[in-house]
Amino acid sequence: MDPGLLAQHAFNGLMLGVIYALVAVGFTLFFGVLDVIKFSHGDVVMLGAFTALAVSAGLTGAGVMSHPLVLLAMLVIAITLMAVVGALLARLLVLPLRGAPAINVLLITLMAGTVIREGVRLFYPQGSNPKPFPRLLPGGTIEIGSFTLRHDSAILFVIGVAAIVGVYLTLARTRLGLAIRAVAQDPETAAAMGIPLTATVLATFAIGSALAALAGVVNGLYYSEISFNLGLLLGAIGFSAAVVGGLGNVYGAILGGFLFAALQTIGAVALPFASAYKDVFAFAAVIVLMALRPAGLLAERSAERI
Amino acid sequence: MTASLLDARGLVVRFGGVTALDGLDLSVNTGETVGLIGPNGSGKTTFFNALTGFVRIAGGRAQLAGADITGLEPRRIAARGIARTFQRLRLLLDLSVFDNLMLGQHLTLDHGLWSSVFARGRFAAAVRGQAEVARTLLAAFSPGLPARLFEPARALTMIDRRRVEICRALIRDPALLLLDEPSAGMTPDETAELMTDLLAVKARRPALTVVIIEHDMAVIERVSDRCVVLDYGRKLAEGSYAEVAADPVVRRAYLGED
Amino acid sequence: MTATIWPALAALLVSAAGVLGLLLAEKQWAVIAIVIAAGVAMLVATRLGWDDRIRRSGGAHACTVSGVALALVVATAFVLREHNFALLMLCTVLLTIVAGLGLTIQFGHAGVVNFAGAAFFGIGAYAAAVLATKTALPHPLVILAGGVCAALIGSVLVLPLLRTRGHYAALITIAFGILFKTFLEVNDTLGGPQGLKVPGFALLGHAFNDPIAIDDETEWSFYLAYAGLSLVIAAAAYVLVRRLERSWIGLAFDAVRLDETAAAAFGVNVAAWKIAAFSIGNFLIGLAGAAYAMMTGFVAPTSFTFGDSLILVSIVILGGLGNALGLVPAALIVVLLPEKLQAIQEYRFLLFALLVIVILLVRPGGLLPRPMRDYSAGEIR
């Protein structure tokens, strides 16, 4: 294959990988602190994108034409709102079910996701149709042989990577990060050492959901189109990525995100069947991987106490 | 010479970098009751888990009645005649006492698809028969228990739950019974009561072989024919309770005296 | 003292009257009135302890009560003999119950999660479409084959499902559900997004899609025949699931769900029982899918989405996880209400999602929580 084309596919795959990793890190953070899966996460991504869309529509309507200003406003508002939504979901649905079977949390958040998804479909103006997402980033390209790098893609890639690095630094270097890691390690000991469980959990859900909002905006800017049901597939992909990487492990989630994107890209480009099968291939590969490494690639060793 | 029922040679179990069992030799004769003691983390429960197939044995071998059971799955080991209780009770609290005991009978029950769906009369007769067996067994531990056969296990007190768990292990008449700290969570009086019942069962089934993990020295002194002391996954001492209790090495390592 | 049969009979009659009323009601206010009345009746019955009496009475006279229930469904279908739409609804409820029974065995009894219920329903439906078009297989066998196909394709998932637990297992079924729908959409031999036509059911030369002519003036709806078919399948599936539940097999399922370690310690082959529950469940779901496809004459990928799988799971949770009887009110609510209340039709996914959230928060046992297996009240049958 032509090296330029190869680079093109590789970059597209990396871009997808960044979006998936942003979503997967949320899943793995929630699982870390509470051992639960918050399946509404994909729909929070979607809600973040729609919030941003509404902000842009509102500002454009009010006559604000500056692209950077609109972009900034929509990032700030979407991220803040989704952080609040995430914390609320944790407070109202996840924390009350502590002590219930873990599957109930999965169920209740699946249903919460449905509520968000249907809410947007029904109550956002013409919510059931795909919506064009404004192109707010500079539109030029850099051409190197047959490899075309769009400026906007490059910027999005940098933003995504920066966010992932930011989360990593938050976890590794801040008091909040220490609290999150302590709760993830052992909630009882953490509580005994004076780390407030509820506050830490809410903060974790807020951070994860803020990342989801960012993923939603990046996704919208990259594809220039969003729809109410984008969260379903993105959620499933993010969950897959987190699980394949090993739930609770942030590196695993990032690795899983890029791996899933690689699988899709290979499925679309390198395999003999039609590119429409790329998701079939990627999910089938996930199922096979789960059979081979049941606890994920970077599994944390844990034995049940008998 | 009595044949040894259980024969463990050089058992090694590792968790990551920690060696939980470090070449343990232990054999138990048919009909014997062996008390297994040692500080927390000395490998007592790990020994049970290794024997019953719940942790991987990294070295050595275990034989039951001359047949190798090393590395078998738990269910296959159960089929060879080892039954156990758990330190933190593992009753199915949402099910009835009867259903819990029937889990103990699992290997003798008819699980055919056809007969389960169509031979309902035969199932009803089996339930009646098993209920009689269960009542008789429960009555040996507490006169009040048989009447509670169809109550949920959750409704029972701690001591009754222990009794039911021991009955669940006994009901299929195992060759080897492993009791993991039966006194945990109970008062000394309750423990004494439970041991009296256990000794009574033992008197009626002389071939029953028991290994019991206990922290309560009074229990060990009362029920065991022989004592084995573990420390750091190895056998520290072995002998009658009196011998072991007098052993200066044991006193230093375990009883904390010097 | 054995319980009398009357409480159970009374409950059955009242429920049947309510369901019939709901199926026939055309005015929105009538539908709302019936729904409110049903809700109030359930609340009152629970408050006064009647639910317990009804249960004991039903347990003590299981054979008679089941017979009466069957007769009441037949009577309902007969009353509706000229109402196409109402009969279609009745059939849909019955077949949804069959699919729910499959999930009940998997999820409720053995604790094997399945978030791909709609996919297995779809496998049954597509199998029926292909077999009834391409082969001369008698149609009852086509429907059975639909179930078998679902069970066989499900067995592909068995290895990863066995090696994983909880969330990981949930992911595998979710991934499979999405994979399946995407596969259908892009696969041209199976009709792609347009789907396939399915021939109607035929038995001994009688085509079920022909209206039943009584005399020159009266014609009964062809759905009456499908109601009979659905009822036979539902009754058989119900008896199968209930009997399995109250057998040593059911105990093995419960043990596997509640405590795999304790189960294995007493010789239970945990993996084998999970496979058994997963396969029996998928068989029932596929059966329902095949019958449904032959009734509606049409299959398309859009009917087998992840959202539809969630609806199936909602039914099982709403009714009371593990309680086969709870599927009846749950399926009625989930299938009938959106069709009868146009006002909520558009909002049904939203409303059911909210309903399940409320149920999980305030009444995790569901509408009819599963009672403990009880052999004392003459329930061994």
Image (tube, coloured by chain):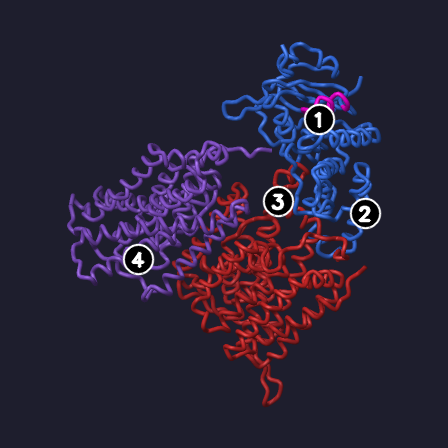
Chain colours: A purple, B blue, C red
Alpha-carbon span between mark 1 and mark 3: 26 Å
Mark 1 belongs to which amino acid?
A: Ile
> Is residue B219 in the magenta section?
yes
Say which quarter of the image contains residue C219: bottom right
**Residue to which mark 2 is pinned:** B129
Are the residues flagged by discs 4 and 1 from a single subunit?
Answer: no
**Nearest to the observer: residue A244 or residue B139:** B139
Check if residue A61 falls in the magenta segment: no
CA gap between label 4 and label 1 equals 65 Å
Q: Secondary structure at mark 2?
A: helix
* Nearer the observer, C272 or C136: C272
Labels 2 & 4 near each other (Cβ < 8 A): no
Q: Are marks 1 and 3 on the same chain?
A: no
Please name the amino acid that badge 3 sits on: Leu
- Which chain hosts label 4? A
Q: Nearer the viewer, residue C184 or B16?
A: B16
- Residue A17: mark: none
Marks 4 and 1: which is nearer the front?
1
